[in-house]
Amino acid sequence: MRQYHIQLEEGEVGEYVLMPGDPGRCERIAQHFTDAVHVRSNREFTTYTGTLDGVKVSAVSTGIGGPSTAIAAEELFTIGARTMIRVGTCGGLADSLRLGDAVLVQAAIRNEGTSHQYVPAEFPAVADFDVLLALEHAAREQQLPHELGIVQCNDALYSEIAPETVPVESMIRAKLEAWKRAGCIAAEMESSTLFVIGAIRGFRAGAVMAVVNTAQSGDGTLPGGVELPIDVAIRVAIGGVRTLIAQDTAKVAAR
């Protein structure tokens, strides 16, 4: 059955799906596929499908934030996607991160609303272990700059990058400082939702993000869209999917 929001049906996407937020990044990801085709665009959801190492894979955009990410994940799972990897951007909190570095997400702080509509606050948002290992292997194998760690997810971008403009400035700054002191390395908006839904529905979920704003800049500015240094994150994601395909193929052959 064709899904209402993503306007896709079974057979139009692969079991492995890379999920950028920006619809415009789907084509950029699909350039790494073989025989990639634009399947459909509806609302914030754009889909390209092709192959990697002979296996069908897709790039499907989620739009910004938890609600639209949840819709994409739910509908993709319904039509057969079983490994979903967010390929996005983040703001670096760790002093060691530089523009363009890849952040491989171990777990996410659920400072957003969507995942709380699924499970209580105490439930952790954790990446699938096999996906995380595959992404790290890809980053190491290609000698790409990366860090692995915990990120925090929120719903309001501009209050986070310019807390002085909102009434709850002191609360935002206090939480951010606490998370940084606890070892949180980056901030973004979607991975916690994806991880929680993956745990509930039973699909593998992971995330790799490109750092587009660093702790050193500290001025709340955002780069222009064409300037976003996302190539490293995309290369890590593609390499990670290739590793998972090889592992999954070997498991099937060994049965």
Image: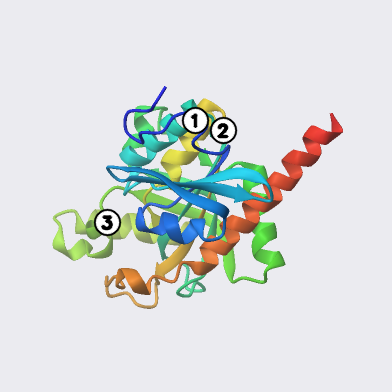
Residue assigned mark 3: 157
- Is 92 drawn above or below residue 127 in the view shown? below
Q: Is residue 80 left or right of residue 172?
A: right
User: How busy is the neighbourhood of tag 1: few (under 14 within 10 Å), some, or many (20 plus)?
Assistant: many
Looking at this view, is 98 or 73 the one in front?
Answer: 73
Residue in the image at 50% along x and 68% along y: 231
In the image, residue 251 lies at what x, y percent? 79, 36
Task: Name the element at disc 3.
Answer: helix
Q: Residue type at mark 3? A: Leu
Looking at this view, is 194 or 164 the one in front?
Answer: 194
Q: Residue furthest right?
A: 254
Residue assigned mark 1: 77
Q: Residue type at mark 2? A: Phe
Task: Tell me the distance, in whole angstroms, between the alpha carbons under discs 3 and 2.
Answer: 28 Å
In the image, residue 8 lies at what x, y percent? 41, 33
- Give the quarter of the image for residue 167: bottom left
In the image, residue 253 lies at what x, y percent? 83, 35
Task: Name the element at disc 1.
Answer: helix
Question: Disc 2, disc 1: CB below 8 Å?
Answer: yes
